[in-house]
Image: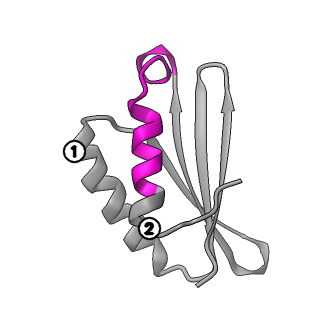
Amino acid sequence: MDKNAILRMEENYMRLTIEYPNPEYKTEICKNIALLENELKIYPEVIHRKERNDDFFTSVEFFGDNYICDRTCGEFLEKLLHSLDIQKCD
C-alpha cells in the first residue's frame, strides 16, 4: 500500500500528515496513536479527512509551549512512523 508522510514544523507547531489510499488503514493509524499516547502520556490533536480522488489523510498535530518545548513530540512522531512502517517522510 502506498503511504506517504509529510512533516511540517514552525515555531510552537509540529504536524505529521499521513496520506493513504485505503480508508481501512485509518484503524491501524488510530490503534498506533492510542498505544503511543498511553506510553508517552502526550495527546496530540488528530484530524482525519478525505479529499478528491479517494485520497485519505490523517494529521497528527502538536502545538503550544507544553509540547513543542519538549522532545517527546518528535519521539512520538518517529515511533508512529516506525510502527506504521513508513520509511520516507518529506
- Label 2 crowd (10 A; few <14 / some 14-19 / many >=20): few
Q: Residue furthest right?
A: 52
Question: In screen coordinates, is 39 left or right of 57?
Answer: left
| Residue 19 position within the rendered picture, expressed as x and y whole percent measured from the top left | 64, 67
Q: Look at mark 1 in the image and give the residue it sits on.
A: 39
Residue 61, disc: none
| Residue 75 position within the rendered picture, expressed as x and y whole percent measured from the top left | 41, 40
| Amino acid of disc 1 | Glu
Q: Residue furthest left?
A: 38
Residue under the image location 78 percent in, 73 percent down: 52
Along the line of sight, the residue nearer the viewer: 36 or 44: 36
| Residue 70 position within the rendered picture, expressed as x and y whole percent measured from the top left | 42, 21
Residue under the image location 60 percent in, 41 percent down: 15
Secondary structure under tag 2 reads loop
Per the image, is 76 magenta?
yes
Along the line of sight, the residue nearer the viewer: 13 or 89: 89
Determine the image quadrant of residue 35.
bottom left
Residue under the image location 71 percent in, 53 percent down: 90
In the figure, 67 relative to 74: above or below?
above
Q: Earlier in the sequence, mark 2 or mark 1?
A: 1
Task: Specify the segment rendered in magenta.
Answer: 64-80
- Label 1 crowd (10 A; few <14 / some 14-19 / many >=20): few
> In whole angstroms, how far apart are the C-alphas of marks 2 and 1?
16 Å
Question: In screen coordinates, is 32 left or right of 35?
Answer: right
Main secondary structure along the magenta-highlighted residues: helix
Secondary structure under tag 1 reads helix
Residue 84, disc: 2
